[in-house]
Image: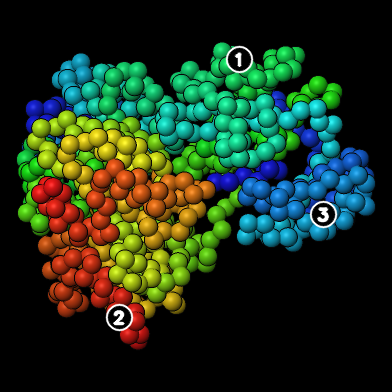
């Protein structure tokens, strides 16, 4: 789930306003966008790459590794299935408000087809100095610089702030993995943590979690046995229970998914949990010093 | 979106799952009339909350006069913060046994999970805690659906062999209702086996995925809308995610994670956030109506505007805030922290239009806002 410079990238929904805007930025950064999809504009060119009728056609004509989906919620299921069946290695699903049963359908197909799904409701992936997939400000050097800290985040905006604070503290990122704000995700905090643990260019990991679900608790189980230090910030400590805090996944129900539970699990695993994103640089420095 | 029992049961009936005969009424007299027609009844408070029985909101009535009395007492009760305005009056069943059945979206298996227990009637958290071995689970591949083998496995504790086929059919129908209505949770508890040998859904809990309501508009009409304050309702109509809290430091940020965090940091530095107001995603051009709503809360003594642009461009959001401040001319002091996409343009606009210098960090902006709220106007 870490994008690399040679990876060939398809953009589904390339001709839309956001699709165009972010494709140009991905290209300018170095992401190897090889084609786009829009059935109504098949055969034309957009952002300097061919527009195909489907992911199947794109696979047959140019070939691709990842697909980034700028597709409206109710059309995402079919677009994702197209890419999975075409043989995509990975999908980055940016869309928010996809019906959860559609998400489950896509994830079942992806599992069967051996496709990695990142998202939905994510801002995407950044590998500083190599490429980015999605709508993160990878090109902003006060936020992303090549370095050795891996960042996992459920939130794009908060993940961005954490990265900014890391760079201000003199660090850079080996990879930013935006996993998404939905209750059911293709890539969980633990999946991303395992990937960064295996990644030789990563010295420490920052987990940017939030209330709701059990992903931070699951990640804590893995973190307990890791050699690399882990620092975490969990958003939502001041949020009232029973309310959905913007993200569909960010809700404390019947005492489950609470801030206290996540913090306790992470601290028990030896993870440093910080109270404000501004502390991330100092916490990572301390953690690396042992 | 939550559905009350009376709104959920017709969906079961439509799929061939029997429910007791009944009628929804809003007065004690009408409850008595229903009982006259149905014989012995159960009078059930209709609120979007569980544990109605424990709260005294569900009562049997043997006669029309008892039904009138029960309804009279239940109507107007407050259960889990909801005032009971209507009761469902249902004919009583002669119960031989009670089961538990449910289908839900399961984050662990990333698919539908069908639950069944031969020990129904009690609440499922208690069941899971007291008798975890009695609650059986089947993870479904949503591309394939629920099948008979899953049914056989789920029903392995059912003593009444004669009811297994009917139970398998019922679970299959329940799964269909779950799928066709984009449910997050569909629960029948208790599911009664009557003395006549039929299966009847005595209660039904339904939660539908909010993200699916756009493709199920007719269903959305039947659910219980969220209880919103006046400002929350205005925000929702404007396409904004706003939650009113009881503090005095107003919060305007982009993205759910950053907005929650801004509230957390206010609390961390000893202040109290007045609201959640997120303008991320597609709403990042809505800074102006968002600011109007945050400032319309009379408790707000100061405001922190915290933007960190990724997808959302801070220059566009700041432009909206500047426009709103010029128009509203609030006396409430505003403190900015702006970083990320569009930062340079946003900072320049704040300087030239308002003569305001944003803080270097969110914490500094938050502390300044907390201090201003303490000083008062």
Residue nearest the observer in this picture, A133 or B83? B83
**Horizontal and vertical percent position of residue B254:** 29, 57
- Residue labelled with disc 1: B152
List x then y, in percent, for residue B345.
Answer: 13, 63
Q: Earlier in the sequence, mark 1 or mark 2?
A: 1
Residue shown at the point (35%, 45%) measured from the top left: A265
> Do the residues under discs 3 and 1 have CB atoms within 8 angstroms?
no
Disc nearer the start of the sequence (3/2):
3
In the displayed structure, would residue A242 be above or below residue B142? below
Q: Residue at x 84, y 25 (%)?
A: B195
Residue B229 against residue A28 in the figure, above or below: below
Image: B313 above or below A42? below
Write down the chain letter for disc 2.
B
Q: Is residue A167 left or right of residue B117?
A: left
Q: Secondary structure at mark 3?
A: helix
- Residue to which mark 2 is pinned: B372
Q: CA distance from mark 3 to mark 2?
A: 52 Å
Query: Of helix, strand and loop, which one carries label 2?
Result: helix
Left or right of B354? Residue B139 is right
Image x and y of residue B194, in percent:
81, 27
Whether residue B114 sits left or right of residue B22 in the image: it is left
Residues packed near mark 3 inside 10 Å, few (<14), some (14 to 19) or many (20 plus): many
Q: Nearer the viewer, mark 3 or mark 1?
A: 1
Q: Toward the viewer: B97 or B339?
A: B97
Q: Which mark is residue B71?
A: 3
Q: Tell me the residue at 60%/36% (across/down).
A: B130
CA distance for labels 1 and 2: 65 Å
Residue at screen point 63% across, 56% down = B80
| Lower sequence index among marks 3 and 1 | 3
Mark 1, residues whose alpha carbon is within 10 Å: few (<14), some, or many (≥20)? Answer: some
Are the residues flagged by discs 1 and 2 from a single subunit? yes
Which chain is mark 1 on?
A: B
């Amino acid at each position: 789930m870490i994008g690399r410079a040679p990876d060939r990238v398809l953009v589904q929904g390339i001709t839309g306003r956001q699709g165009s805007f972010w494709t140009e930025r991905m290209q300018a950064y170095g992401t190897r966008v090889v084609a786009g999809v829009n059935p109504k504009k098949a055969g034309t060119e957009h952002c300097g790459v061919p527009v195909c009728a489907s992911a199947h056609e794109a696979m047959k004509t140019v070939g691709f590794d990842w697909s980034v989906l700028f597709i409206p919620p109710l059309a995402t299921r079919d677009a994702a299935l197209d890419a999975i069946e075409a043989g995509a290695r990975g999908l980055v699903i940016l869309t928010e408000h996809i019906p959860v049963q559609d998400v489950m359908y896509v994830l079942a197909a992806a599992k069967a087809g051996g496709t990695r799904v990142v998202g939905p409701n994510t801002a995407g992936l950044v590998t500083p100095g190599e490429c980015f997939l999605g709508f993160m400000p990878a090109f902003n050097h006060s936020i992303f610089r090549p370095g050795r800290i891996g960042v996992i985040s459920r939130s794009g905006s908060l993940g961005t702030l954490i990265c900014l604070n890391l760079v201000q503290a003199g660090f850079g990122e080996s990879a930013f993995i935006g996993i998404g704000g939905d209750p059911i995700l293709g890539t969980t905090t633990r999946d991303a943590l395992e990937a960064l643990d295996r990644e030789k260019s990563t010295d420490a990991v920052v987990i940017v979690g939030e209330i709701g679900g059990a992903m931070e608790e699951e990640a804590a189980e893995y973190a307990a046995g890791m050699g690399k230090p882990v620092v975490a910030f969990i958003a939502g400590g001041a949020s009232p229970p029973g309310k959905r805090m913007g993200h569909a996944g960010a809700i404390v129900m019947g005492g489950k998914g609470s801030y206290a539970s996540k913090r306790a699990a992470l601290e028990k695993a030896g993870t440093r949990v910080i109270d404000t994103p501004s502390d991330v640089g100092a916490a990572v420095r301390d953690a690396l010093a042992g | 979106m939550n559905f009350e029992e009376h709104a959920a049961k017709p969906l079961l009936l439509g799929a061939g799952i029997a429910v007791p005969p009944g009628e929804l009424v809003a007065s004690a007299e009408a409850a008595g009339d229903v009982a006259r027609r149905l014989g012995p009844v159960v009078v059930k408070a209709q609120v979007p909350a569980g544990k109605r029985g424990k709260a005294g909101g569900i009562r049997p009535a043997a006669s029309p006069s008892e039904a009138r009395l029960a309804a009279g007492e239940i109507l107007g009760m407050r259960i889990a913060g909801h005032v009971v305005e209507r009761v469902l009056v249902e004919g009583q069943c002669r119960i031989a046994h009670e089961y538990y059945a449910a289908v839900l979206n399961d984050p662990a298996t990333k698919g539908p999970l069908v639950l069944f227990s031969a020990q129904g009637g009690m609440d499922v958290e208690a069941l899971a805690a007291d008798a975890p071995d009695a609650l059986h689970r089947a993870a479904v591949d949503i591309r394939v659906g629920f099948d008979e083998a899953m049914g056989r496995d789920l029903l392995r504790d059912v003593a009444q062999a004669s009811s297994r086929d009917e139970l398998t059919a019922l679970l299959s129908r329940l799964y269909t209702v779950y799928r066709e209505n984009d449910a997050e949770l569909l629960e029948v508890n208790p599911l009664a086996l009557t003395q006549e040998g039929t299966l009847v859904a005595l209660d039904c809990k339904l939660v539908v995925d909010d993200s699916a309501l756009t493709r199920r508009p007719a269903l959305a009409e039947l659910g219980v809308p969220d209880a919103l304050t006046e400002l929350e309702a205005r925000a929702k109509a404007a396409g904004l995610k706003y939650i009113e809290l009881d503090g005095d430091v107003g919060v305007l940020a982009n993205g759910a994670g950053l907005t929650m965090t801004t509230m957390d940091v206010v609390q961390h530095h000893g202040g109290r956030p007045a609201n959640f107001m997120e303008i991320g995603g597609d709403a990042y051009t809505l800074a102006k109506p968002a600011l109007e709503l945050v400032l319309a809360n009379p408790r707000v003594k100061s405001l922190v505007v915290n933007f960190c642009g990724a997808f959302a461009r801070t220059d566009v959001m700041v432009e909206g805030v500047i426009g709103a401040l010029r128009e509203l001319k609030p006396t409430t002091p505003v403190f900015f922290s702006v970083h990320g996409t569009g930062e340079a343009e946003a900072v320049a606009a704040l300087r030239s239009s308002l003569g305001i210098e944003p803080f270097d960090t969110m914490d500094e902006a938050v502390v300044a806002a907390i201090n201003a709220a303490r000083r008062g106007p």
